[in-house]
Image (cartoon, rainbow, N blue to C red):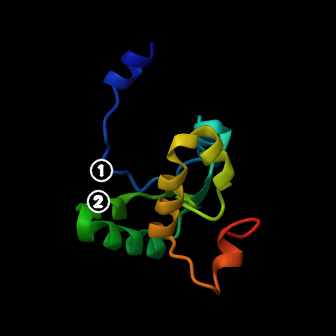
C-alpha cells in the first residue's frame, strides 16, 4: 500500500486560487503532528500562511537559491519550522548515540556558536 501511494506522488507546481477548506488544512496539520520523529521528540512547529504578501516574500526568498518562485501561486503555505539546537535536549541525543557525544557537541557549536552571553540560553544546565 505505501509503495503504491508513493509511486503516485507528484510535486504540484500550478495552483488554483481557490481557498483550501479549513477542515482540509486541519487534517493535513494533524497528519504532520502525528508524523514520526527520532525519540518522538517532534522538534517542529507548523505555521499556516494565507496572506498573499507573506507568501510572495517567501516565494522570492525560495527563488534565490532553489528556483521555487512557483510558490507564489499557492493560496496557502504550510511551513515547518524546527529548532536545530537549544530547544532539543542535547542529553537525549547523547544518550541515544553515546559514541557520537563529541560530534553532537561540535555540531551544536558550529550551528550555534556559544558566547558568554548566550551560554546560559543555549543549554539547559549550562556547559
Is residue 52 in view from this perspective?
yes
Observer-nearest of 75 and 86? 86
Q: Is residue 59 above or below residue 76?
A: below
Dot placed on the residue nearer the N-terminal end, 2 or 1:
1
In percent of the image, x 25 and y 61: which residue is there? 66
Q: Give 40 or 108, whichever is nearer the viewer.
A: 108
Q: Secondary structure at mark 1?
A: loop
Asked if the residue under mark 1 is in contact with the one under mark 2, i.e. CB atoms within 8 Å, the reply is yes
Residue at image point 67% right, 69% down = 127
Relative to 117, say whether 92 is above or below. Answer: above
For mark 2, does the 10 Å Cα neighbourhood hold few (<14), some (14 to 19), or many (20 or more) residues?
some
> Residue tagged by mark 1?
14
Q: Residue at x 25, y 71 (%)?
A: 64
The quarter holding residue 57 reads bottom left
Q: Residue at x 63, y 81 (%)?
A: 118
Density class for disc 1 (Cα within 10 Å; few <14, some 14-19, many ≥20) is: few
Residue underneath mark 2: 70
- Does 122 sit left or right of 113 as displayed? right
Amino acid at each position: 500500500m505505501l509503495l503504491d501511494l508513493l509511486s503516485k506522488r507528484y510535486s504540484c507546481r500550478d495552483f488554483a486560487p481557490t481557498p483550501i477548506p479549513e477542515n482540509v488544512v486541519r487534517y493535513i496539520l494533524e497528519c504532520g503532528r502525528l508524523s514520526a520523529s527520532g525519540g518522538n521528540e517532534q522538534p517542529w512547529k507548523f505555521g499556516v500562511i494565507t496572506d498573499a504578501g507573506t507568501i510572495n516574500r517567501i516565494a522570492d526568498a525560495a527563488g534565490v537559491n532553489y528556483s521555487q518562485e512557483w510558490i507564489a501561486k499557492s493560496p496557502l503555505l504550510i511551513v515547518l519550522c524546527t529548532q536545530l539546537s537549544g530547544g532539543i535536549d542535547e542529553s537525549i541525543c547523547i544518550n541515544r548515540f553515546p559514541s557520537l557525544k563529541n560530534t553532537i557537541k561540535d555540531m551544536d557549536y558550529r550551528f550555534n556558536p556559544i558566547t558568554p552571553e548566550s551560554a546560559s540560553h543555549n543549554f539547559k544546565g549550562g556547559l
